Amino acid sequence: MRQPRGPKPKVIQLTKRQRNILEQIVRRSKSSQCLVTRSTIILKADKGLNNQYIADDMSLHVQTPRKWRNRWAEAADELGDIENDLDDKALMARIEGILDDAPRSGVPPTFTPEQICQIIALACESPADSERPITNWTHAELADETIKRNIVESISSRSVGRFLKGREPETALESLLAEQ
Protein backbone atom coordinates (compact mmCIF):
# COMPACT_ATOMS: atom_id res chain seq x y z
CA MET A 1 0.00 0.00 0.00
CA ARG A 2 1.34 3.38 -1.03
CA GLN A 3 1.96 5.94 1.73
CA PRO A 4 -0.35 8.94 1.19
CA ARG A 5 1.15 12.38 0.64
CA GLY A 6 0.42 15.44 2.70
CA PRO A 7 0.18 16.16 6.41
CA LYS A 8 -0.64 13.37 8.82
CA PRO A 9 -4.26 13.48 9.91
CA LYS A 10 -5.10 14.15 13.54
CA VAL A 11 -5.26 10.98 15.59
CA ILE A 12 -8.72 10.07 16.84
CA GLN A 13 -8.99 7.81 19.88
CA LEU A 14 -12.51 7.07 21.02
CA THR A 15 -13.48 5.79 24.41
CA LYS A 16 -15.66 2.70 24.54
CA ARG A 17 -18.72 4.82 25.41
CA GLN A 18 -18.06 7.26 22.58
CA ARG A 19 -17.65 4.40 20.11
CA ASN A 20 -20.88 2.75 21.32
CA ILE A 21 -22.82 5.99 20.98
CA LEU A 22 -21.46 6.68 17.49
CA GLU A 23 -22.39 3.13 16.47
CA GLN A 24 -25.90 3.67 17.87
CA ILE A 25 -26.22 6.83 15.80
CA VAL A 26 -25.17 4.93 12.67
CA ARG A 27 -27.64 2.08 13.35
CA ARG A 28 -30.56 4.24 14.50
CA SER A 29 -33.25 4.52 11.85
CA LYS A 30 -34.15 8.10 12.79
CA SER A 31 -30.63 9.50 12.42
CA SER A 32 -30.18 12.02 9.62
CA GLN A 33 -27.89 10.93 6.82
CA CYS A 34 -25.43 13.72 7.51
CA LEU A 35 -25.17 12.59 11.14
CA VAL A 36 -24.66 8.97 10.04
CA THR A 37 -21.96 10.03 7.57
CA ARG A 38 -20.14 12.12 10.16
CA SER A 39 -20.35 9.38 12.79
CA THR A 40 -19.01 6.85 10.28
CA ILE A 41 -16.11 9.17 9.45
CA ILE A 42 -15.15 9.38 13.13
CA LEU A 43 -15.47 5.61 13.59
CA LYS A 44 -13.22 5.00 10.58
CA ALA A 45 -10.74 7.62 11.81
CA ASP A 46 -10.63 5.80 15.14
CA LYS A 47 -9.52 2.69 13.25
CA GLY A 48 -6.48 4.63 12.01
CA LEU A 49 -7.65 5.23 8.43
CA ASN A 50 -6.46 8.45 6.86
CA ASN A 51 -8.73 11.06 5.31
CA GLN A 52 -8.13 10.03 1.70
CA TYR A 53 -8.99 6.38 2.40
CA ILE A 54 -12.13 7.39 4.29
CA ALA A 55 -13.13 9.74 1.48
CA ASP A 56 -12.57 7.09 -1.20
CA ASP A 57 -14.39 4.42 0.80
CA MET A 58 -17.41 6.65 1.42
CA SER A 59 -17.39 8.45 -1.96
CA LEU A 60 -16.74 11.82 -0.35
CA HIS A 61 -14.41 14.70 -1.11
CA VAL A 62 -11.27 14.46 1.02
CA GLN A 63 -12.14 17.75 2.73
CA THR A 64 -15.19 16.16 4.35
CA PRO A 65 -13.36 13.61 6.54
CA ARG A 66 -10.65 16.20 7.24
CA LYS A 67 -13.22 18.71 8.47
CA TRP A 68 -15.03 16.27 10.77
CA ARG A 69 -11.84 14.69 12.07
CA ASN A 70 -10.56 18.17 12.98
CA ARG A 71 -13.86 19.18 14.56
CA TRP A 72 -13.88 15.97 16.63
CA ALA A 73 -10.24 16.44 17.65
CA GLU A 74 -11.00 20.01 18.82
CA ALA A 75 -13.86 18.75 21.02
CA ALA A 76 -12.13 15.57 22.23
CA ASP A 77 -10.59 17.07 25.38
CA GLU A 78 -13.85 18.66 26.48
CA LEU A 79 -15.74 15.45 25.68
CA GLY A 80 -13.28 13.40 27.70
CA ASP A 81 -13.64 15.77 30.66
CA ILE A 82 -17.43 15.67 30.76
CA GLU A 83 -17.99 12.07 29.70
CA ASN A 84 -17.99 10.66 33.24
CA ASP A 85 -20.44 13.33 34.44
CA LEU A 86 -23.07 12.59 31.78
CA ASP A 87 -25.52 9.75 31.31
CA ASP A 88 -25.70 8.09 27.89
CA LYS A 89 -28.58 10.28 26.69
CA ALA A 90 -26.78 13.51 27.59
CA LEU A 91 -23.51 12.24 26.11
CA MET A 92 -25.31 11.32 22.89
CA ALA A 93 -26.80 14.82 22.74
CA ARG A 94 -23.33 16.35 23.20
CA ILE A 95 -21.82 14.10 20.52
CA GLU A 96 -24.65 14.99 18.13
CA GLY A 97 -23.94 18.66 18.90
CA ILE A 98 -20.30 18.19 17.92
CA LEU A 99 -21.35 16.51 14.67
CA ASP A 100 -24.06 19.06 13.92
CA ASP A 101 -23.67 21.85 11.38
CA ALA A 102 -22.03 24.98 12.69
CA PRO A 103 -24.19 28.09 12.72
CA ARG A 104 -24.04 29.85 9.40
CA SER A 105 -23.56 33.52 8.97
CA GLY A 106 -26.15 35.38 7.02
CA VAL A 107 -28.29 38.41 6.76
CA PRO A 108 -29.74 39.44 10.12
CA PRO A 109 -33.52 39.15 10.34
CA THR A 110 -35.44 42.10 8.96
CA PHE A 111 -38.14 42.02 11.64
CA THR A 112 -37.72 41.58 15.37
CA PRO A 113 -39.77 38.96 17.23
CA GLU A 114 -41.64 41.83 18.91
CA GLN A 115 -42.64 43.28 15.55
CA ILE A 116 -43.79 39.87 14.34
CA CYS A 117 -45.87 39.43 17.51
CA GLN A 118 -47.44 42.85 16.95
CA ILE A 119 -48.31 41.95 13.35
CA ILE A 120 -49.88 38.67 14.43
CA ALA A 121 -51.74 40.43 17.25
CA LEU A 122 -53.03 42.93 14.69
CA ALA A 123 -54.31 40.04 12.61
CA CYS A 124 -56.29 38.89 15.66
CA GLU A 125 -58.12 42.22 15.80
CA SER A 126 -61.24 42.98 13.81
CA PRO A 127 -60.59 45.09 10.70
CA ALA A 128 -63.50 47.30 11.78
CA ASP A 129 -61.48 48.35 14.87
CA SER A 130 -58.96 49.89 12.45
CA GLU A 131 -61.74 51.56 10.47
CA ARG A 132 -61.17 49.23 7.52
CA PRO A 133 -64.21 48.61 5.27
CA ILE A 134 -63.60 44.85 5.20
CA THR A 135 -64.81 41.91 7.25
CA ASN A 136 -61.61 39.80 7.09
CA TRP A 137 -57.97 40.80 6.91
CA THR A 138 -56.03 40.21 3.73
CA HIS A 139 -52.26 40.08 3.76
CA ALA A 140 -52.14 43.35 1.81
CA GLU A 141 -54.50 45.08 4.26
CA LEU A 142 -52.45 43.81 7.21
CA ALA A 143 -49.23 45.04 5.62
CA ASP A 144 -50.79 48.45 5.02
CA GLU A 145 -52.13 48.70 8.59
CA THR A 146 -48.78 47.56 10.02
CA ILE A 147 -47.04 50.43 8.24
CA LYS A 148 -49.81 52.88 9.20
CA ARG A 149 -49.36 51.96 12.90
CA ASN A 150 -45.56 52.40 12.62
CA ILE A 151 -44.89 48.83 13.67
CA VAL A 152 -42.43 48.63 10.76
CA GLU A 153 -41.28 51.08 8.10
CA SER A 154 -42.14 48.78 5.22
CA ILE A 155 -43.36 45.22 4.74
CA SER A 156 -44.72 43.20 1.87
CA SER A 157 -47.98 41.32 1.95
CA ARG A 158 -45.92 38.16 1.28
CA SER A 159 -43.94 38.71 4.50
CA VAL A 160 -47.17 39.08 6.44
CA GLY A 161 -48.36 35.84 4.85
CA ARG A 162 -45.16 34.04 5.92
CA PHE A 163 -45.69 35.15 9.51
CA LEU A 164 -49.22 33.78 9.49
CA LYS A 165 -48.30 30.70 7.42
CA GLY A 166 -51.87 30.01 6.38
CA ARG A 167 -52.98 29.45 9.96
CA GLU A 168 -55.47 31.24 12.06
CA PRO A 169 -53.76 34.31 13.60
CA GLU A 170 -54.29 32.98 17.14
CA THR A 171 -52.49 29.72 16.23
CA ALA A 172 -49.67 31.61 14.52
CA LEU A 173 -49.16 33.74 17.63
CA GLU A 174 -49.08 30.66 19.90
CA SER A 175 -46.53 28.86 17.69
CA LEU A 176 -44.30 31.98 17.51
CA LEU A 177 -44.33 32.34 21.30
CA ALA A 178 -43.54 28.62 21.71
CA GLU A 179 -40.47 28.99 19.44
CA GLN A 180 -38.96 31.68 21.69
Image: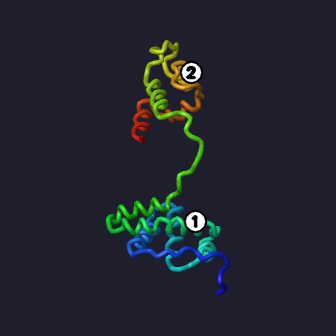
Tell me which numbered mark, 2 or 1, is placed earlier along the sequence: 1
Q: Nearer the viewer, residue 34 or 127?
A: 34
- Seen at 40% across and 72% down, the residue is 20
Say if 158 sits above or below 79 in the image: above
Q: Position of residue 96 (x, y in %)?
A: 45, 61
Secondary structure beneath dot 1 equals helix
Query: What is the quadrant of residue 49 in the picture?
Result: bottom right
The image quadrant where one finds the N terminus is bottom right
Secondary structure beneath dot 2 equals helix
| Number of numbered callouts drawn | 2
Q: Position of residue 177 (x, y in %)?
A: 40, 37
Q: Which residue is mark 2?
A: 144
Q: Nearer the viewer, residue 10 or 141?
A: 10
- Seen at 46% across and 76% down, the residue is 13
Distance between mark 2 and mark 1 Cα atoms: 48 Å
Cβ atoms at labels 2 and 1 below 8 Å apart: no
Say if 16 sits above or below 63 in the image: below
Task: Judge the density around disc 2: few (<14), some (14-19), many (≥20) Cα neighbours within 10 Å.
Answer: some
* Residue type, numbered disc 1: Lys
Q: Which mark is residue 67?
A: 1
* Residue type, numbered disc 2: Asp
Task: Judge the density around disc 1: few (<14), some (14-19), many (≥20) Cα neighbours within 10 Å.
Answer: few
Q: Which mark is residue 154?
A: none
Q: Position of residue 160 (x, y in %)?
A: 54, 30
Of labels 2 and 1, the one closer to you: 1
Q: Position of residue 42 (x, y in %)?
A: 51, 71
- Seen at 44% across and 34% down, the residue is 172
Say if 160 sits above or below 92 in the image: above
Picture colour scheme:
rainbow
**Outermost residue, bottom direction?**
1
The image quadrant where one finds the C terminus is top left
